[in-house]
Amino acid sequence: MAKNFDLSVELCGVKLDNPIIPASGTFGFGREHNEFYDINILGSISVKGTTREARFGNPTPRIAECRAGMINSVGLQNPGVDAVVEHELPELRKIFRKPIVANISGFSIDEYAECCEKIDKQEQVAIIEVNVSCPNVHNGGMSFGTDPKMAAEVTRAVKAVTTKPVFIKLSPNVTDIVAIAKACEEAGADGICLINTLLGMCIDTLRRKPVIANKMGGFSGPAVFPVAVRMVYQVSKACSVPVMGCGGVESASDVIEMMMAGATAVQVGAANLKDPYACKRIIEDLPQEMERLGIERLSDIIGVVE
Amino acid sequence: MYKKDIYKVISNLPLTKDVYRMVLEGDTKWITRPGQFVNIELEGLYLRRPISISDWDERTITIIYKVVGRGTSLMSKMAEGVKLDLLTGLGNGFDTSVESERPLLVGGGVGVPPLYRLAKDLLAQGKKVSVVLGFNTSSEIFYADEFKALGVDLHISTVDGSRGVKGFVTDAIREAAIEFDYFYSCGPLPMLKALCGCCEVSGELSFEERMGCGFGACMGCSCKTLAGNKRICKDGPVMKREEIIW
């Protein structure tokens, strides 16, 4: 490549070499993908969603193939915040030297705050991503993200216990995404991450039963990309805080589209499961795509679409 | 350690009405143990399809699969020369270093394939290997001759009694009064459970589950065991009988 293409972006003062961040839940704590390639090429990593207590998650089957994507109902399996802090994050530190995004979930306002407080003390954590949008757990997760008042309450509780930038990860399963994003911004959120999965369902017509044991689950994959672009666009126009775009991203071209819609950083989710090299391939393809579109600095295109 | 690479179909032929054997050519150095699997990308489908490895050599991988859905249906129509994107060397595989003189291998239906290479490896260690293969009916039987040719002590059961012992693999084990000091098994869950009910010795079993990634990242195929939560794709698919919660 003749020219020097600048892929770097800045997210609430956190400088990233490139905008590519594997989405929480599709990349574990980095170890598995690090067996395929050196994960230090990534902008950052959003690690597996963490709750106060260890969770097994939902019964299996909790994965289903569907048209242009997949449904998962893992249900936030994780070893609990203490094990994450004591074991997972130090292990990740050994293989990934950049700042990370810690993703936390909860079943009560107190739980969110407690998780955040413990994660906040970890030096390698640069950004805290608060999942108020998991479609796979009852009485928690998504119920906090589908009501502006609740989303704001979680935001305030988390902001009270950390000085690190807080991104609220929102659910697309709402009527008015802007109202919820604005409520989070007004409550002090430093950024918004969207979208989490769309609630979906898939039926085994031979057995006349849902494929997923939990009946429904989160739909992700390339089919949701236009929904994600639309919501990133709406929220980034309505809010002044930065947006991390997520949903169906599979290529460098998708990344540029998502950034033009208003995303400062772009998360890659389901693609990491189908192609373990997805993020690496996207990062390597970006300069060529930038050259094709006449872009020298990736940060120049953030939200250029009127 | 595992690898993603491109493999060429060099043969793909039916063994029964709906069970096929596919031989793929490519790099096999990431496969280290019998019982491991490959995860195959198929055009038009989002998730890869995990299929157990039946055998391999320096340049080929043999898989045996039953047509049960869209993925395996697509595979069954593939001609020689088709190139496929595979992740290979996935899963822990069977432990052939376990001390045992007379291992028993028990396979049910499409659980049979991974036992083929396992039998070969155990025989190569000089062990006296007994194999019990269970099927629904005689027309569904495959690989009986191949196992026989290896020189194992082979027993067959069919549910309808059309060949071998009438009934399940457990009936065949009892009827032939097979002596064994360890067992390896792969097959449907009820068979694995019944087997553990009738075997007193230690052993290991291979499980299956719908998978997302196949290499341990997504936690899609987790199960609870007495040794903690395990990912069937990464910490399994083979588990010790002692750690299984039925």
Image: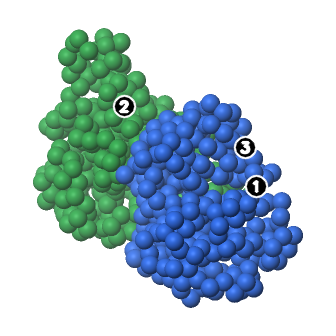
Chain colours: A green, B blue
Q: For mark 3, give the secondary structure.
A: strand
Q: Which one is nearer the viewer's eye here, A229 or A150? A: A229
> x, y percentage for residue A104?
30, 57
Residues marked 3 and 1 touching at CB (< 8 Å): no
Say what amino acid the circle numbered 3 marks.
Leu
Residue A286, numbered label:
none
Q: Quadrant of the N terminus of chain A?
A: top left
Mark 1, residue position? A206
Q: Is residue A202 visible?
A: yes
Query: Are dots 3 and 1 on a single chain?
Result: no
Mark 2, residue position? A281
Letter of the chain that mark 1 sits on in the rendering = A
Residues marked 2 and 1 touching at CB (< 8 Å): no
Which residue occupies 43% across, 71% down?
Answer: B97
Q: Dot 1 surroundings within 10 Å: few (below 14), some, or many (20 or more)?
A: few
Residue B13, numbered label:
3
Which residue occupies 23% across, 65% down?
Answer: A87
In the rendered view, tell whether residue B87 sits above or below residue B211.
above
Label 2 to label 3: alpha-carbon separation: 35 Å
Query: Are dots 2 and 1 on a single chain?
Result: yes
Q: Dot 2 surroundings within 10 Å: few (below 14), some, or many (20 or more)?
A: some
Q: Which one is nearer the viewer's eye here, B23 or B214? A: B23
Camera-near label (2 vs 1) is 2
Letter of the chain that mark 3 sits on in the rendering = B
